[in-house]
Image (spheres, rainbow, N blue to C red):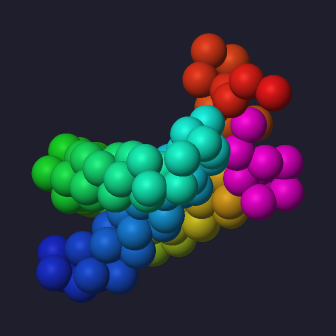
Amino acid sequence: MIKKYGFRKYVVLPTCLLLLNALEEVIIYKSEMVEDPYLRTAVILGLFIAGFSMVAFVISPLIAKWLEGVYLASRKTAGGIGTTVLMLGVIAGLFVLYYVIYILGVEAIVPDAFENPT
């Protein structure tokens, strides 16, 4: 069984970092609306700081708590197969997210109200 530190180190941390990278892609996409390069840089920095803070203090603890709960439940219910299915599900979810971002474009994941005007 993966100990709590190992689980956070090998599952939760990479998941949060990949989600943070996806958030960065959305921020860069939205910053294209700003024409002035200095203002665009300031907007990107401000949104990155807000995004990093949100991931570090809100999303990461929620993901850690949720994944640890699901991990323990799947371990208890289905043993090693349950944990394997959980890890494959997390990997598949991240794969789909990155496929959509890099192949279909960021526009595919942002709501219509947040799309950049053409």
Percent coordinates x, y for residue 81 in the rendering: 53, 69
Q: Is residue 83 left or right of residue 37?
A: left
Q: Is residue 82 magenta?
A: no
47 above or below 2? above
The residue nearer to you, when weighing 63 against 34, is: 34
Relative to 57, is 95 above or below? Answer: below
The outermost residue toward the top is: 113
Residue 34: give x, y in percent of width and height: 56, 40
In this rendered view, identify the residue nearer to me: 114 or 59: 114
User: Is residue 20 visible from the viewing direction of this image?
Assistant: yes
Position of 64 compared to 45: left or right? left
Quick check: 17 left or right of 66? right
Seen at 78% across and 48% down, the residue is 105
* Residue beneath the point at 16% across and 81% down: 5
- Of 103 and 60, nearer the camera is 103
- Tell me, yes or no, if residue 76 can be seen here: no
- Tally the numbered discs: 0
Provide residue 117's location: percent of width, then percent of height. 73, 24
Give the left or right position of residue 95, taking residue 14 as reference.
right
- Label the magenta part by its dominant secondary structure: helix
At 74% from the left and 37% from the top, the residue drawn is 107
Task: Give percent across and percent down for residue 88.
Answer: 60, 66
- Where are the magenta residues, as a range? 99-107
Of residues 51 and 109, the one nearer the viewer is: 51
Specify the quadrant that holds the N terminus. Answer: bottom left
The question of residue 106 being in magenta is answered with yes
Q: Residue at x 43, y 48 (%)?
A: 39
- Figure quadrant of the C terminus: top right
